[in-house]
Image (tube, rainbow, N blue to C red):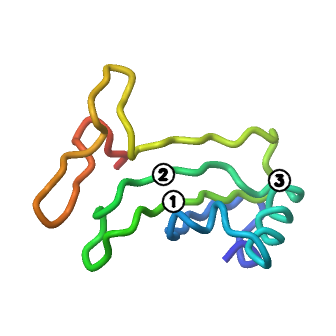
Amino acid sequence: MIHSLAVGGRIAAIAPYGVLFRGASEGLIRKRVIEENLLDAVIGLPENIFYGTSIPACILVFKKNRKNSDVLFIDASKKDEDGNFRYVKGSNQNELTEKHRIL
């Protein structure tokens, strides 16, 4: 996906949360993405946010030819600055609150 991006293009990928921490080849990929300044943002999502899986996930946002080297981290699985959870716990599936959705 990153290879096919246009100059200045941006892409987002959803992955299991473990992709942020596992070693071996995934660690090498993370290292190269950082070295090439391609990672723009990481958004951590709570468990049960997608149908059919209970594991927490994350959204990785990549951008080619970034002007800065900062990476934005958002943890949508925790509480916001007011002390409220950023998601509503459902019986089968959690849902991000309206206030915390980016559409």
What's the residue at 41%, 54% (across, down)?
45
Q: Residues within 10 Å of mark 3 (few under 14, many from 20)?
A: some
Mark 3 lies on residue: 37
- In primary-sequence order, the first of circles 2 and 1 is 2
Mark 1: which amino acid?
A: Ile
What's the residue at 87%, 59% (across, down)?
36
Q: In the rendered view, does 49 fall on the left or right side of 58?
A: left
Q: Quadrant of residue 35?
A: bottom right
| Relative image position of residue 78 (x, y in whole percent) | 38, 39
Q: CA distance from mark 3 to mark 1?
A: 17 Å
| Relative image position of residue 93 (x, y in whole percent) | 19, 63
Mark 3: which amino acid?
A: Asn
SS of the residue under disc 3 = loop
SS of the residue under disc 1 = strand
Mark 2 lies on residue: 44
Q: CA distance from mark 2 to mark 1?
A: 7 Å
Mark 1 lies on residue: 59
74 versus 83 height, above or below: below
Q: Nearer the viewer, residue 97 or 21?
A: 21
Q: Quadrant of residue 92?
A: bottom left
60 versus 50 height, above or below: above
- Quarter of the image that includes the N terminus: bottom right
Point out the frontmost of discs 2 and 1: 2
